[in-house]
Image (tube, rainbow, N blue to C red):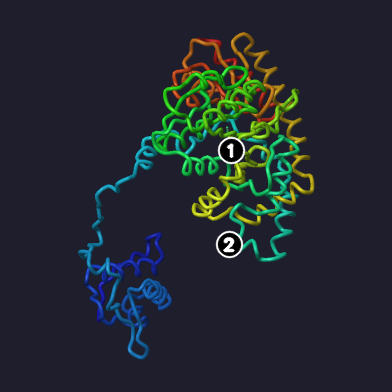
Amino acid sequence: MDLAIALNSNSPLPLYQQLYQELRQAILNGRLSPGVRIPSTRSLAKSLSISRTTVTQSYEQLLSEGYLTTISGSGTFVCAQLPDDLLHSKPIESSQTITRSPVKLNQYGMILSQTENLPRIAAPDTEINFRYGQPAIDQFPLKLWRKLLSRYFYSNLSWLDYSTEPLGYKPLREEIASYLSRSRAVKCDTDQVLIVNGTQQGLDLIMRLLIEPGDMIALEDPGYMSARLIFQTQGAELLPIPVDDSGLIVKELVNYNSKPIPLVYVTPSHQFPTGAILSLPRRLELLAWAQQNGGLIIEDDYDSEYRYGDRPIPALQGLDRSDSVLYIGTFSKVLFPGLRIGYLVLPKNLVAIFARAKWLSDRHLPILEQQALTDFITEGHLERHIRKMRSLYEQRCQVLVKALNVHLGERVTILGEKAGIHLMVKIHSHLSDEEIIYRAAQMGVGIMSAKSQYLKPDHTGEFIFGYGELTEQQLAEGIRRLAQIFLIE
Ligand SMILES: Cc1ncc(COP(=O)(O)O)c(C=O)c1O
């Protein structure tokens, strides 16, 4: 049988792939009908003037995909039974593309498709970028981490298998429970700790299990946009509660009584993005509200390790007497965000259902990293690293505050310099936020407006300055350049 096959030796596609595609098309459009015998590799290679290996490679691919079959002693044939969907669909011309009616999304998909800022918009690439949320990853002890990973790599193969622990690697949960009790006065057993893929998955699980579309969620305004997006896409109704320099204004929550509020989301140890610390009286007021109203509180404790000066206030979870707090922590700030390890501390009665949801969603986190992290904590490296980074960030914060005062003086009001790795800065200017960002970028400086962190983005002149990953020189130079943009208003 002679087969008319066009091969292009100038094409970037290897010859065997071209031949494979041509043969596959010939089978699909019926030129090579089911059951027909195709030429041997030797004769096809000869008739096309190509190597026999090339033909063999394409035949092997077609054999493995079920288009061809071999009968020993007789040769190679087009399969009599192609997959049903191929047999029943109309023959496809090689140039024809198939259009299908749009896939119908469910409510979650519909809301998601209309939601902006997803995935997180990368901050524009500038020489000095004050992007927020970024720890100094260049300070992470890589050699030590490699040593810890290799300790488990060959020791036994359990990390290659499915985990048998739906809550996460037990020794890691033990370490986390004891670390939280030491450093944050969190009260929990090992079995209340569920290891999750960062804060984001913790929030996602809470939404799946506890919230129905239309339920009301109260949250700080401004607040953490990524949390808000999870709530919104779940179809929750949002109740923005303003914050002041003592954090969430709990009175506003207490006074609201139009509809039950099953859930409140807060960042009490370092309000995002204003940096306010929720005062002790307000913590107690919030817990009393939860107790009286049967509401639950999500406590997002994302960077409480970095406090400069004042003594830490115990976590809400540790003050709670009524199982009202779902506590979430993460290693994204203290170690590095790509690690994707966080934890939920759950009231005992919710543990089993959360473990089920986590298992159903993605089974568990990679075991090897959990093992390495366990030793990192047990051997004291975590607390050592935090101490080192705390003093580095404090220093960086001071340099940034000083540079803002020196170069921009009255033009700025600085918030949140007592904790964390970012500041919120109000810039008093006639320029729009967009113009400020544009002019800053022209000077090689990247800054981000806080607008998108508000539920109603009509707040202007507020910016978030991340300083975690910038050196003192970059911080000072960045602000010096920023001041230039206000010379002409
Ligand atoms: C308020 C808040 N919570 C949590 C996180 C960390 O999220 P994840 O643990 O998913 O990396 C961030 C990161 O910027 C944050 O700003």
- The residue at the point 70 percent across, 17 percent down is 402
Q: Quadrant of ligand 1?
A: top right
Q: Position of residue 42 (x, y in %)?
A: 37, 82
Res 141 → quadrant: top right
Res 44 → quadrant: bottom left
Seen from the viewer's position, the closer of residues 402 and 364 is: 364
Seen from the viewer's position, the closer of residues 487 and 290 is: 290
- The residue at the point 46 percent across, 25 percent down is 239
- The residue at the point 45 percent across, 22 percent down is 257
Give amino acid for label 2: Tyr
Viewer can see residue 445? no
Q: Which label sits on residue 487?
A: none
Residue at mark 2 = 162
228 to 222, vertically: above or below: below
Seen from the viewer's position, the closer of residues 398 and 181 is: 181
Residue at mark 1 = 326
Q: Disc 1 or 2, which lies upstream in sequence?
A: 2
Q: Position of residue 6 (x, y in %)?
A: 29, 67
With 235 as the anchor, is 330 left or right in this view?
right
Q: Position of residue 243 (x, y in %)?
A: 56, 20
